[in-house]
Amino acid sequence: MGEVRNNHSDNDTHAAPVWLDEAYLEPILQRSKKDPGLRILQLDIKPATAKGENYASIMTRVKVNYLASGSKVPGHDFYIVKTTYENDPYIAGVFGGYDVATTEMQMYEKILPQLTDLLQQTSNPEKVFAQTLHVDYEHAAIIFEDLTVTKHQTADRLIGFDMEHAQLALRKLAKMHAAAAVLNEQQPGVLTKYDHGIFNRHTQGFAPFFTSMVGVAAEFAAETSELGPYYEQKLKAMQKRVMEYSTRAYDPQPDQFNTLIHGDYWVNNVMVRYNENSKELQDLVMIDFQFCSWSSPAVDLHYFFNTSLETEVRFQHQDALVQYYHSILVQTLKDLNFSGYIPTLRQFVLQMEKARFFAVTVSLVSHAIMINDQNADADFNGLMLDDERGRKFRKLIYTNKKLRDILQRLLPVFDRCGLLDVVD
Amino acid sequence: MSVTDLISALDSLPKFESEVIVKGSNCPGVPDWLTETYLEHALQKFYNDQALKITALDLRPALGKGENFGGVLTRLKVDFRRGDGSCATGHYILKTSFEGDEFARKAMEPYDIFNREMSIYEEILPKLKSLLLEIHDEEEIFAQTMTVDYDRSALVFEDLNARGFVMPDRLLGLDLKLARLVLRKLAKMHATSAVLNERENGALESYDRGMFNRHTENYAPCFLGLLAAAKRRVSQWPGYEKYAEKLESLLPIYMELGKRVFDVTQSHINVLAHGDLWTNNVLVKYDKASGEPLDVIIIDFQYSAWGSPAIDLFYFLNSSLQWDLHLHHQEDLIRYYFDIFSATLRKLRFNGNIPSLVRFRHQIQTKEFYAMHTSCTIFPIHRNVETEDADFNALMENNQRALNFKDACLSNPVTQRLLKELLAVYDRKGLLDANQ
């Protein structure tokens, strides 16, 4: 399993925020530890994200040496500070439309702590989220515990999860989904107002990216003998509908089970922990709540399945994983005395089918950039802009052999289900 | 013993060879009224030739035990001379209902299978053929009707055997080419029926007595008995206990789940479903030289009902295919069917909503219980090799003989292998849960 890369030269990482200093952090720590006499002795600040790891935010790792009141021995705490691309107006403009900073701040400040409280009441409580230290709306910054300190690490996005990891990831997801449904039942409207997922009815900011990538996929099909002009034509025609069809998967339907979905649930947005000695998988925490929205859980599942699984698990065991996810969802909903609609497994399977077009988008576009190992132009401009650099980068993404092999198998599966047909 | 050996053994069983009958008949199952005179009148009407005369008549039983539970079939070979002096030979099948067995008659009565088949051969199928001719499609889907006699519950249609059509091997299942041939015919039959229903203001919607329906549960002992037999067999397999439990828990809700498949969902595309589409209701013409299948004809419309195409699709795809197709290629075949179905609807200018493949799949998926039902209870009967006790009573009753018969069906190794593969698949799709 890989680690988050953090030992790169300055060209490959992003700079830490200027306002992050002792004077800023001390009162925050004092409040958090209920210790007005606490003093910060030393701050160690390091950039934490490399290019290609995160297109939407900047992460900074903070190590704090402090002295608690009446203590002679210094304490150490570790945090991650998460901020946005405030300085780049283009990026800020696009992401602004998605409200990502606000959503995530509200998640960490208000929502996740309430979900945690709810989950504490279940018969098998477990940690699902990182604990929030502080949310700063003015600087659009979130500070939460650094999970690497408790030996959590990011998994290898190039390989994906086996069944064991996948089940653990789905168990946590199911608990989040269940707790969120219950929270909204207790406080009607508190979560249904979140409607700025990656696909939403307010902005099409990412459209150039998705549309152009489907075009690259069409070219890939044309030059692959097993696929050929049939698929090329279908994908070319699909370009102008991919945004609408994907957004339909997100629209909450009244006769389905809806909840607050994660919205970007893939390998890089969980952190896993192994036993130091036995190397056994022990725990998993969910991170990164920028794209939460009130939708069908099928969105999270199709996204997860098509970005985060080992290839054979993806092709052969999705049904079993859905069944597993569903069992935890139902168990947790019942544990929390949810009195709303709880879908049967069959009903949930049909709900997954209704949103299945989203698997196409995720497979052709999202997964393509996630298993990209060519990092030179791997930034937001490379994804979005219709310039020489952007076109070159997007084409390069599709030279990835693993991606090509998967799509060669997957496109006929989608096609026989009618998912590559433009219907309106 | 391999499957091929079994088939050879079955084939070499002495067939019921009767004497050639010329006038009058003492052929078993053939009614008294079936005289040369009767047939002569029928032929005169059919050929619109009052001077037609029969010169020779040959009657033989058409099927053996285990091949058809829905009536008595007699093969007729009729030599006749037309009014203009020319001679010809007609080959027909006479189909009449069970007249002997009171138990069977009573059980089947509310399903009205004989009247239904007669009305379909008389009124519906010829109109479907006309619709195809409207779009210059000369595809042959059914046997041609010669005469329909409601008073006597008798149906005479052309004997396709005489044209070289034979029954495919019911134990092997159909290969890709044959499956597609059947699906092509089915698609056109479905499409024309949807159009006919539209043009005749819902006339086909009165066909509401399929195998599961809201008028009767007479076949419950058969379906529930087979489900129970499946459960008995599955519970013997280590590691399959939870599936056996799920099958058991389905018993109280099973008939209701079946009825929901047949309930008409108005917002979906609906058709006149065949209702019993499996290998034995399909006749194939093979090329004499290469052995390749050239054409198929669909027969036996006793269980036709207005409803979802899923009724036929899930039944056919889960009863009649070769192993690999059954397990891994149903989606391909559904697409193949759908492309022809929707194209035919379009050509005929169907006014209703023609769903996209994606929508169509969503629609039929609401009826997917029928796939599980077919694989788990129908497939075992169809593939049964112990045909000695294979009759209607063995299916419908609950006595020891009937239980033994059903257990025998579930002892077939092919059936067992199928269940071992598919139970897990159905379970993951939520189709084994009492609460679906």
Image (spheres, coloured by chain):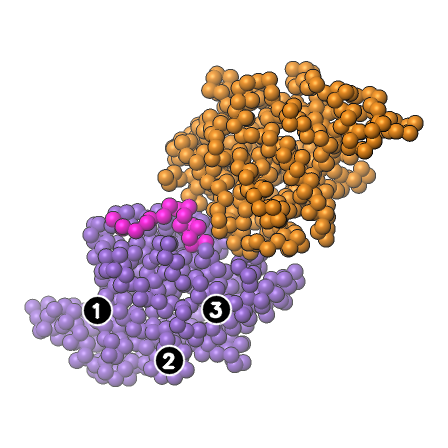
Image position of B260 with respect to A49: above or below: below
Please provide the residue range marked out in magenta. B349-365
Look at the numbered disc 1 and give the secondary structure of its residue.
Answer: strand
Kindly tell me whether residue A163 is visible in this rendering. Answer: no
Per the model, the C-alpha gap separating discs 3 and 1 is 37 Å
Q: Identify the residue position indicated by label 2 in the image.
A: B105
Residue placed most toward the observer, A241 or B317 = A241
Q: Are marks 3 and 2 on the same chain?
A: yes
Q: Earlier in the sequence, mark 3 or mark 2?
A: 2
Q: Residues within 10 Å of mark 2 (few under 14, many from 20)?
A: some
**Quadrant hosting residue B296:** bottom left
Specify whether B360 is left or right of A118. left
Chain coloured orange in the rendered structure: A
Chain B colour is purple
Q: Which residue does the image show at 75% across and 42% down from the upper left? A: A282
Residue A422 is situated, as x and y percent measured from the top left of the image, at: 38, 38
- Marking on residue B146: 1
At label 1, the amino acid type is Met
Residue A193 is situated, as x and y percent measured from the top left of the image, at: 54, 39
Kindly tell me whether residue B362 is visible in this rendering. Answer: yes
Q: Which residue does the image show at 53% across and 59% down from the upper left? A: B436
- Marking on residue B255: 3
User: Mark 1 or mark 2, which is nearer to you?
Assistant: 2
Q: Which residue does the image show at 29% across and 63% down from the upper left? A: B204
Q: Pointer 1 indicates a residue of which chain?
A: B
Residue placed most toward the observer, B198 or B286 = B198
Specify whether B82 is left or right of B368. left
Q: Are marks 3 and 1 on the same chain?
A: yes
